[in-house]
Image (cartoon, rainbow, N blue to C red):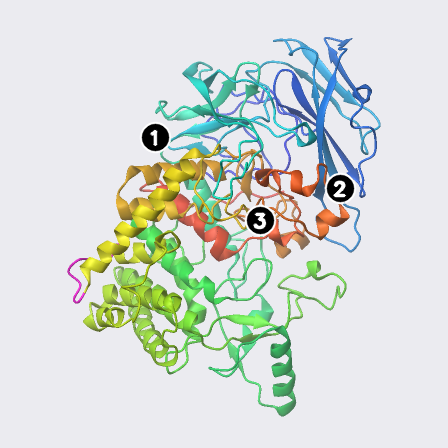
Amino acid sequence: MLLRTIIGTLTLVAGVFADAAQPYGFGQVVTLGKRDQLVHHESLRVLTAEVVGFVHFQQGRKMTGSMDDPSSFTILEDGKPMTGLKVLGRFVKLHHMGHVPEPYLPATLIGTVYVKLPKPMSEGKTYVFRSRSIGSKGVEVSLKWSDKTVLSDAIKVNQIGYLPDSRIRLAYVGKWMGTGGALDHKVDEFSVVDLESGEIAYRGKARLRHRAGQKTEGAYKQDFSGENVYGLDFAGLKKPGAYCIQVPGVGRSYSFRIGKDVLAEPLFTSIRALYHARCGIALEKRHTPWTRNVCKQHVKIATYPEYGKPLDFKSIAAYLKKSKAEGTLEYRTVRGGYHDAADYDRRPMHIPIANNLCRVYEMNPKAFIDQQFVIPESGNGIPDMLDEAWFLLLYYLETQWPDGGISAGSEGTGHPFTHEHPKNAWRSTTDNESVEYVMLPVSSESCFSFAMSAAHLGRLLEGFPQGETKGKKLVEAAKKAFACGMQKFPPKNLGDEFRIAQAAAELLHSTRDARYAKAIDALPTLKSAKIDYLNNIGLAYTFSTLPHDLPGLDKIFQEKLRKGCIGSVGWAVNSFTLKKGYLHFKHPWAPIGTGTASVTQAWWMALMWKMSGDPLYRDLLCASVDFALGANPMGQVQCSGLGQRHVLHPEYLESMNDQLEEYLPGLWVYGPGNGKSWITNIYPPTPAVDKIPSLYSFYDIDQWPGQTEFTVSETILPAVVMFGALAPENPSPYLKPLPKPK
């Protein structure tokens, strides 16, 4: 299995050769074949042979210099100045706010000026690009033009690799240039170059998929990219190997592979991000370079009445103060669960993660083995994927009350905070955090979500000799939680019925007890209600996995759910998904934001594929994977540590405050999204916020939760499902040392 984690912004790379089998490592950029040659510089973004972007950086709130004046730029062709340069436009925004966040730290702006040459660059000629009096340092870049070696910022590919059997395999050409609008360059033909031999392995015709200004994408009639989007379809190339895209007069793409095993790396990286979110244990060197101590505020937490009033920051603080004064406060030592994003609280919405890890294991069981992900449980005879699910549920299992009630998680007196840095909460870590936590009261969501997940995982663990005891314990705990939930939280609305039905279905599957089928039948509105199947793919999928011979199973309702979901999702796909410039799945009524431009809804295609058996959904899953891994307008992987251009600054407090330049890999951020924030108020972009296309509206700032935050349930888990459903069978144990980050 490859661990290919690339760090930082790329610098000029030319003429570097390596064997295709050599893995990427932290802080390295390697090539994928003997003929793989990449020319690229962080200060110059080449779009085509006649359009380039000069990239400038400056600390402060405003970029200095005349960015609209052609005289600010000089281009030499074999030593001779080119006259007649034309400035097309500019894009200026905040770039970074410092690795270790400090109050009022000077921020860095990035400003790209797009310039059109008087004529296209010629093969073999050397060009020098200079700018003056713009930003803190001008541009000084030299390159020899060849569309075989020079990276084009306008070509977008899956930077990790494509599956050989996907019937949809696309790269894209297009670029939005800020105030300059869409790149106007007609693309006719393209080639796929074999990086081992240097020969052309495939030729194809480009197709204009979307024209800039056409508001035809999504139910709200939007233009997501603002680009003229050309699709490069090379699904006809099946041969495994290392390749790049080459477009005459445009340049080449990042390198990528075609192979059955290409998604092993993003799966490995993503599932390990869950391991790094574990609560209540130390992260040790034998498992990770990103070590930390036991999160001290989360091992010993205060109890709270089992059915107490709902809590918030203020009520928790008041409860702790009162209980301490009265001497009635009790503590419980706990393990398990996950930290939630930049916060450290355990949440009830985390519980279904275990159910979904079980789902993806069942989707592709030959892809998951013991000793696969370098976690503490590796080597115990149980697939690591199921061990990860067990650790998550451990907190909820250990905090189960005698009557079966399940704690909804843990919450503190506020967001992470430290007395060492009272004016800067961004400096908090699990080592210095001062926030106190309590065990949250039982809720309907926690009871039924636990019953569902514990019944599912328990059933699977019972299939392994080493997991039989754990499995039985989980199933018994699930039964108690379900009974408690039915007694204390009878359904009040259709949403409650959905949650109960999924829990009962998993218990029916695990116990074969007809009482759970009767519990589903007794739900007052479930079977007669008009269900928005597009929003209830999980419910339909759960029922589709139930064996037909289960006692009391309503097969008619089971089929109604399946067909209804297939019909409604099919409408969304045909009406919207297949018509988008950049092909990926999201709910048509969901705006761009909170991960809809990446993984948060795309993983539904895995459920649809397995539920329906329709290869179209597998193809759309593959296309969504491609989009998430770089085949998107920004040409950027929306995850730390994957691909040659990726998110650099996710909102992860441990990485923001450690001594490693490389942030923790595997953090799938929310990504692009509409709207303003305090950042855009203080550092207004050019063009204005409302003029930036949705899929270009991204700030790689670790202090912007709406874009660079992640959650274990909303972003990391969906990525694990996507890659896990498509992962190669029969992987080898990962027994070699982990690479060292920068």
Q: Which mark is residue 664?
A: 3
Nearest to N terminus: mark 1 or mark 3:
1
Report x, y in % for residue 589.
47, 48
Q: Quadrant of residue 392?
A: bottom left
Identify the amino acid type marked 2: Thr
Residue denoted by label 1: 167
The quarter of the displayed image where residue 119 is located: top right
Question: Is most of the magenta stretch helix, strand or loop?
Answer: loop
Q: How far apart are the two marked residues, 1 and 3, measured between alpha carbons?
A: 33 Å
Report whether 26 appears left or right of 65.
Answer: left
Q: Residue 325, percent across and down?
A: 65, 89
> Which mark's residue is nearer the viewer, 1 or 2?
1
Task: Judge depth for marks 1 and 3 and give the one in front.
Answer: 1
Q: How many marks?
A: 3
**Residue 466 position (above or below residue 486):** above
Q: Residue at x 50, y 38 (%)?
A: 4
Task: Tell me where the magenta segment starts and ends, as one range.
Answer: 544-552
The spot of residue 422 in percent (x, y) is 75, 66
Q: CA distance from mark 1 to mark 2?
A: 43 Å
